[in-house]
Amino acid sequence: LSLPKESGLGAVPYLHLFQGFWCPSHCIQGVENFQKHFHAKDNDVFVASFPKSGTTWLKALTFAIVNLPSFSSFEHHPLLTSNPHELVSYPEFILSRDFHDQVLSLSNMSEPRLFSTHVPFSSLPESVTKSNCKIIYICRNPFDIFVSSWEFFTKLKLVSLPALTYEEAFEKYCNGIVGFGPWWSHMLGFWKESIATPNKVLFLKYEDLKEDTEFHVKRMVEFLGCTITQREESTEMVENIIKLCRFEKMKDLEVNKSGEIDKFTEKKNFFRKGKIGDWINYLSPSMIEKLSKITEEKLSGSGLSFKMH
Ligand code: A3P
C-alpha cells in the first residue's frame, strides 16, 4: 500500500508539491505536457481560476461572449443543453494522456479557441504568458471557497481515497494544502499580473459578478475586444448572455440533458447554492478568526480584498 504524500479536502486526489504548488497527482503529467507541448495562439482566450471560485459560471459567460457571432440567436444555444465543462476544457487535464493526439486536436480547434485552467500563473506555459492571448481570472473570498470545496469534494466518488475530517480539511486549507494551492499564491499571482498587464489579464471577483453582473459582463466584452456595434443591441445581447448563464437556469442542465455522469462527479455538483456568505453556516467562531487572520496576513499590502456577505 503506497501512502499519499498529502491528501486534500474531503476525498480529493493526492496532492504533490510541484513547482511550488499543490498539484493533484493525476494531473502532474498533464501540467508538464501543457507546459512543453501547448502552443498558444494570439487570439486564444483562457478562463483561469482557483477551484470553486466560480469557474463554471465564468466558462459559460465567456463561451457565450466569444461565440456571439456564431450563436447570436440564443434560441438554439449550446449552453441550453450542455454543461459549460463540456464546452470549455482544461489543457492540464486533457493533456495528461494520449497527448500527441490531443495536441493535434487542440491545434485544429476552430478559432478563437477558449480554454480553462487552474494552473497558477507562474506555471503556465510561456506561450500563454508571453503571447497576446487573453486571460480572464475569477477570484472568490477564501471562506466561501473552503465551504464550496468541502461540499464538492465530499461528494466526489473517489471512495478509495482516505477522507479527511472537516477539521483536518480546514487545517490543510489554512496551510495552503489544497489542489492548486496555496490559494493566496494563486490569487496573488494573477492579481499582480492583472495590475502589470491589464490588457492581458482581467481580474474578476465572484462577489462583484453576483452584485452587478451586467457591468462586469460588459467589462469582459470590452476586454475581449468583441464588437457589438449598436448600443441598444449591445445591452440586449448582454442581458441575453446573463439570462442564459443564470445559476437557476444552469443548475438543471444535467436533468435537461442525458443525465450523463462524468468520471468523478455528477455535473450538477458544480451548482450548489451560488450565494455569497454561505460560510457563516459552516465555520465556527475560532475557524472564522483563524481564516480571517491568515487572509489578512497573506493578502496584506496587495490591495486585494473581498466582500464577505
Ligand atoms: P457554491 O458551492 O458556494 O454554491 P466552480 O465552478 O469554480 O467549481 O465554483 C463552484 C461555485 O460556483 C459553486 O458555489 C456554484 O454553486 C457556483 N456557481 C456555479 N454556477 C453558477 C452560476 N451560473 N452563477 C452563480 N454561481 C454559480
Image (tube, rainbow, N blue to C red):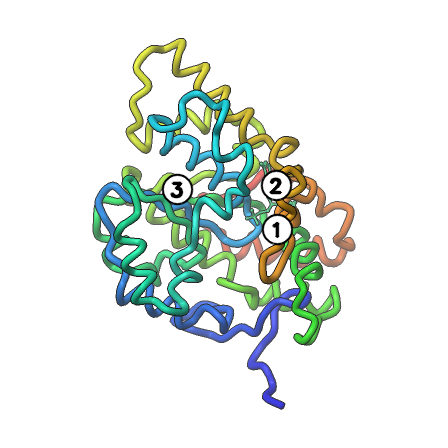
Where disc 3 sits, the SS reads strand
Circle 1 packing at 10 Å, graded few (<14), some (14-19), many (20+), is few
Query: Marks 2 and 1, Cα distance to the nearest angstrom?
Result: 7 Å
Q: Find disc 3 in the rendering and name its residue.
A: 136
Q: Which mark is residue 142?
A: none
The residue drawn where x is 56% and y is 41% is 306
Q: Which mark is residue 257?
A: 2
The residue drawn where x is 40% and y is 27% is 71
Q: Amino acid at mark 3?
A: Ile
Q: How many marks?
A: 3
> Which one is earlier in the sequence, the residue at label 1 or at label 3?
3
Circle 2 packing at 10 Å, graded few (<14), some (14-19), many (20+), is few
Where disc 1 sits, the SS reads loop
Q: Which mark is residue 260?
A: 1
Which residue is at the front of the view, 141 or 74? 74
Q: Is the Cβ of the residue at disc 2 closer than 8 Å to that at disc 1? A: yes
Q: Is residue 73 above or below residue 63?
A: above
Residue 308: image quadrant is top right
Relative to residue 185, is residue 248 drawn left or right? right
Q: Amino acid at mark 2?
A: Lys
Q: Is the Cβ of the residue at disc 1 closer than 8 Å to that at disc 3? A: no
Q: Is the Cβ of the residue at disc 2 closer than 8 Å to that at disc 3? A: no
Which residue is at the front of the view, 289 or 219? 219
